Image: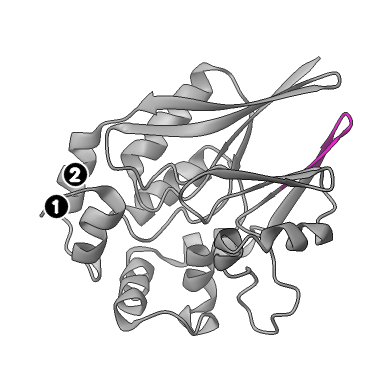
Amino acid sequence: MERKLAIFSDIHGNFQALEAILKDIKEKEIEDIYCLGDVISIGPNPKECMDLIIKNNIKMVLGNHDLYYIKGTEIDDEMNEDEIAHAEWTSQQLNDKYKEYLDKCPLQIKEEIGEYKLAFQHFLFNPNKEDQYPFDDISIVKDNSIKSKMQLLDASITFIGHEHQPFKVESNNKKVIDIGSSGCTKDDNTFYTLVSIKDDDITIDKVNIEYNRKEFEDSFNNTIYPDRDRTAKRIFGINN
């Protein structure tokens, strides 16, 4: 019997992209849906995105921006003033309902399907950190120290996000697959990852779909919030 899983990450307030993703997943009748965190922040619609996650009963793990909301920005001492101001704005768009929901979301979900041990998390964890920020520094990707960090993993395949550009790393019969950001796109295309497992075979494909880019840009341009101008072109490819 074949089992299919849909995975996406780093929506970052892009309601139109999330809406298109969930519509396509529903049309394919895929029931196992995983979000790897960072539904909120950066984009203009954190509340609307959270509403879709809750309504569709998505299996979600926490990202760093979700943690900033429920635990406070003080957990990350590398945030600048603009980023802190933006996180505070995001918090103001939400209420206790969303905080209670996110507070119940784990940092990791594990699944065993056939011979495959799968893990879903926002990024690799740093076991040496004593504060409330659990993730390793993203620099481990660029300096390739991620391979040594993978020795701590007990899953055969670990799906992550956080780094908005997708990549794959394999070491000691373990794989880390960063699926990239489905929300921080610079055109009218978004995507999710489709995992199909049947017997001893697994296929992992990127599913590209179009979303209503004009509606997203209108929403972005009509919403004024801290750190918006910096992220417009760099993150979303919008020229103000």
- Report the number of numbered marks: 2
| Label at residue 217 | 2
Amino acid carrying label 2: it is Glu
Compare residues 229 and 52 and report the one nearer the observer: 229
Compare residues 198 and 18 and report the one nearer the observer: 198
* Up/down of 183 relative to 213, above or below: below
The percent coordinates of residue 92 (x first, y second) are: 33, 70
Tell me the crowding category of disc 2: few under 14, some 14 to 19, or many 20 or more residues within 10 angstroms, Cα based: some
In the visual, does 92 lie left or right of 35?
left
What is the secondary structure assignment of the residue under circle 1?
Answer: helix
Is residue 118 found inside the magenta-colored segment of the image?
yes
What is the secondary structure assignment of the residue under circle 2?
Answer: helix
Amino acid carrying label 1: it is Asn
Q: Which residues are magenta?
A: 111-119
Q: Which residue is mark 1?
A: 221
> In which quadrant of the rendered image does the C terminus lie?
bottom left
